[in-house]
């Protein structure tokens, strides 16, 4: 049995699903298959927060608005952050970003993964030119004589298309099977993620403390007017992470409060904790004949600035625009020039962000006294230069 499509997207997470909707809405004549391994979509809980969140920038917000998903996110649950406080936990360097300096109502929004995914999937379900194939896995694929690609699913169905897009995450089966060359290394860190309730209001502020053992972020959450819940991402060395994960709830709250310098008072409650190994990955190329990588399939970075999903959405935006451009100009989707344009737009930007994040990690993770002085002095100087702060925010939170 064979089914013919124009585009096959493997992975129906935030990036893959958003890409499918963007292409489907821009090109109504395009037929898209989205292949997803998980059997069901997890509904957002009305009783508790999802431990996984994304810090969406303005550009990501505009993209989600353009594909119709932002309204659904607003109706469910999201939290704007209007300020950002960043400081060196082992010195006195500090920098404060204020949305008012940018003449905007917020620097970004904290959104639970399940909320964002549900809003995007509602739009996906409404697109008549998208078939969501779940639960299905890609067993193999091969290029065909007709300049297309044939994808065999584990159910035995063969799906044929002009373009195969890998949005199947950091351990991408498509990337590995197509032998994309990678640069990667292990950080030797774990990210502990969970939700906490704090004694004091988070004041719609994103907080980040840098320590030599790794950064700690408190990201504001809001539900029914509450300002006392935060999502935390505590990135720390493997041995410390193991120690923290073994603590009971009371002792973990105490250790977390100390690490956060009690900026929001006592940590009154903590939800279930999850520990995620951190590894940097970057494909040397994002494209081959008939194949493109997007999101975590192409790159993963340290979560210290919360940019991972944003970079993936920027990939989705750029690739959808190149596909739309090709359709308008009647260029076949198997034409490699389409994919090369996408790669030119995204590879250098992603490399730059990854380099900046790596520099931050190494700078604040160093125990060298000279670097310790340099980073504190640097934070103080930047905090006093309003124009430079505006430039930083404009690029980092675009």
Image: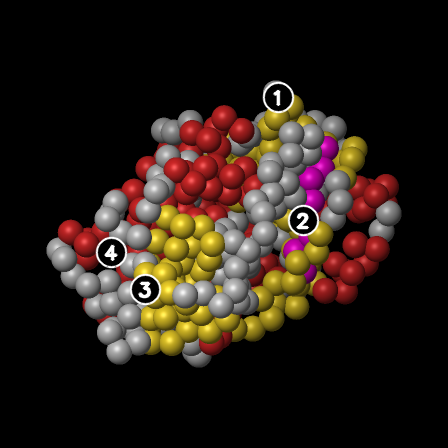
Q: Which of marks 2 and 1 is in front?
A: 1
Which residue is found at the position 36% from the left and 41% from the top?
Answer: 127
User: Of the residues under marks 1 and 3, which one precedes in the sequence?
Assistant: 3
Rounded to the nearest angstrom, the CA distance separating label 4 from label 2 is 36 Å
Q: Residue 84, position in %: x, y?
A: 52, 38
Which residue is found at the position 71% from the left and 52% from the top?
Answer: 274
Which mark is on residue 186? none
Which residue is found at the position 62% from the left and 21% from the top?
Answer: 224
Q: What element carries label 2?
A: strand
Which of the 4 image quarters holds residue 142?
bottom left
**Residue that numbered label 1 is attached to:** 224
Rounded to the nearest angstrom, the CA distance separating label 4 from label 1 is 41 Å
**Residue that numbered label 3 is attached to:** 161
**Residue that numbered label 4 is attached to:** 322
Q: Which of marks 3 and 4 is in front?
A: 3
Badge 2: how crowded within 10 Å, few (<14), some, or many (20+)? many
Q: Which residue lies furthest to the top in this view?
A: 225
Rounded to the nearest angstrom, the CA distance separating label 2 from label 3 is 39 Å
Rounded to the nearest angstrom, the CA distance separating label 2 from label 1 is 23 Å
Stretch in magenta: 190-197
Q: Residue 380, position in %: x, y?
A: 51, 46
Q: Which of marks 2 and 3 is in front?
A: 3
Q: Residue 226, position in %: x, y?
A: 64, 23
Left or right of 268, for residue 165: left
Q: Is mark 4 on a helix, strand or loop?
A: helix
Badge 4: how crowded within 10 Å, few (<14), some, or many (20+)? many
**Residue that numbered label 2 is attached to:** 193
Which residue is found at the position 61% from the left and 26% from the top?
Answer: 223
In the rendered view of the protein, which quadrant contains the C terminus? top left
Rounded to the nearest angstrom, the CA distance separating label 1 from label 3 is 46 Å
What secondary structure prevails in the magenta region?
Answer: strand
Front-most of 198 and 9? 9
């Amino acid at each position: 049995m064979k089914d013919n499509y124009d585009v096959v997207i493997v992975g129906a997470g935030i990036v893959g699903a958003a890409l499918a909707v963007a292409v489907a809405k821009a090109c109504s004549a395009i037929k898209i298959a989205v292949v997803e391994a998980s059997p069901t979509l997890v509904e957002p809980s009305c009783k508790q927060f999802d431990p996984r969140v994304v810090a969406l920038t303005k550009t990501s917000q505009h993209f989600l608005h353009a594909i119709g998903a932002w309204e659904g996110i607003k109706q469910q649950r999201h939290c704007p952050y209007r300020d950002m406080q960043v400081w060196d936990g082992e010195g006195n360097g500090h920098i404060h970003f204020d949305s008012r300096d940018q003449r905007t109502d917020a620097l970004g929004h904290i959104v639970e993964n399940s909320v964002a995914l549900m809003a995007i999937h509602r739009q996906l379900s409404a697109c008549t030119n998208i078939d969501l194939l779940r639960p299905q896995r890609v067993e193999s694929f091969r290029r065909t004589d007709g300049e297309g690609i044939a994808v065999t699913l584990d159910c035995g169905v063969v799906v044929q298309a002009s373009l195969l897009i890998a949005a199947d995450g950091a351990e991408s089966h498509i990337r590995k099977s197509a032998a994309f060359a990678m640069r990667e290394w292990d950080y030797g860190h774990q990210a502990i993620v969970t939700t906490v309730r704090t004694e004091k209001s988070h004041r719609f502020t994103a907080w980040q403390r840098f320590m030599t053992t790794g950064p700690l972020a408190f990201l504001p959450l809001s539900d029914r007017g509450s300002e006392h819940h935060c999502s935390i991402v505590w990135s720390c060395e493997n041995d410390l992470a193991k120690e923290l994960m073994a603590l009971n709830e009371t002792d973990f709250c105490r250790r977390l409060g100390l690490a956060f310098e009690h900026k929001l008072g006592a940590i009154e409650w903590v939800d279930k904790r999850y520990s995620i190994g951190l590894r940097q990955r970057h494909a040397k190329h994002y494209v081959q004949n008939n194949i493109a990588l997007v999101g975590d399939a192409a790159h993963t970075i340290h979560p210290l600035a919360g940019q991972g999903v944003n970079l993936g959405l920027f990939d989705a935006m750029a690739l959808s625009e190149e596909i739309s451009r090709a359709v308008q100009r009647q260029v076949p989707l198997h034409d490699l020039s389409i994919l090369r344009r996408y790669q030119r737009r995204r590879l250098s930007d992603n490399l730059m962000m990854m380099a900046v994040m790596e520099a931050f990690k190494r700078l604040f993770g160093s125990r060298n006294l000279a670097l310790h002085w340099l980073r504190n002095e640097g934070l103080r100087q930047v905090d006093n230069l309003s124009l430079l702060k505006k430039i930083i925010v404009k690029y980092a939170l675009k």
